[in-house]
Image (tube, helix red, strand yellow):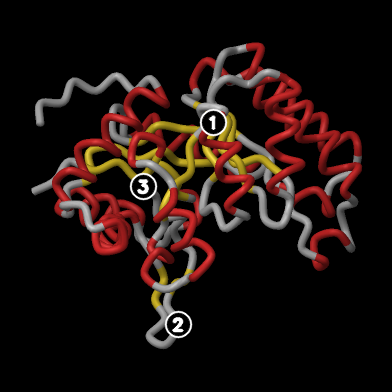
Amino acid sequence: MYKLIDTHAHLDELRNLDLMLEEAKKAGVIAIVAVGSNYQSNMKTLEISQQHRRFVYPALGLHPWELGNLGTFEIDKNLRFIEQNIASAVAVGEIGLDYDKRVLKVASKELQKEVLGRLLDIARKYAKPAIIHSRYAWKDALYLIQDIGVSKSVFHWFTGFSSVLRDIIDGGYFVSATPATEYHEEHRRAIKEAPLSRLLLETDCPVTYGREARYESQPADILRSIRAVSRLKEIAEATIAEQTTRNAIDFFSLDLDIVF
């Protein structure tokens, strides 16, 4: 059995969480980075991590999708909570930019960049990695990360241009592979081009995947991620498992003592 780390899971959104965590352990998952997306999500994520110490590691964030529902007071409240609890978190995330037209109708580029800048300032100040959502905003997200000086960032579920991917890799940053590596052409291209030394695995559960047979994901579906990456890159699953797990332990500074 491989030793795997799901580096991006919305555990606060899972039904039957305890069952899902047991299934994950049976699949070889040794740790999960649980990401937050708003105030309530962050609180729940911290609670889950306290109940599952040294298995669930919390990240605290404010997702760009949430900004359309929040005024200045609520945004400030979210950021204060993140900073006040940053010592309990292994990363700041999920944060980022989303330039999909449906998101831009409720949260302008200017607002998104302002909030992301403030969140990246927290990551830099406390030397925490950033977990980045960057749909259709890859260049702007990378520019902000570099401009603010965040040393560790992962572009989760990356689907951007090859030129931006090269800049991400050259900057020492990471991308992560989801189960969509099985079929999503832009994601497949990015994962194929990314070096294994800059790759993490994730599920983004409970996202629904699949082109024909649709399914709601859970952390155990990290097996789909590794199998798809193995086929795509023509690298043995065992090699991918060891390298991506080492990458994740180093990237998030996880207190795991693993023998491969």
Q: Marks 3 and 1: which is nearer the front? A: 1
Residue with the mark numbered 1: 170
Q: Is residue 167 above or below residue 208?
A: above
Q: Nearer the viewer, residue 27 or 87?
A: 27
Q: Position of residue 116 (x, y in %)?
A: 76, 35
Residue with the mark numbered 2: 211
If you read the primary sequence from the N terminus, does the residue marked by circle 2 or circle 3 appear first? Answer: 3
If you read the primary sequence from the N terminus, does the residue marked by circle 3 or circle 1 appear first? Answer: 1
Element assignment for label 2: loop
If you read the primary sequence from the N terminus, does the residue marked by circle 2 or circle 1 appear first? Answer: 1
Residue 201 disc label: 3
Q: Amino acid at mark 3?
A: Leu
Q: Amino acid at mark 2?
A: Arg
At x 68%, y 46%, the residue is 63
Q: Position of residue 17 (x, y in %)?
A: 35, 54
At x 44%, y 47%, the residue is 176
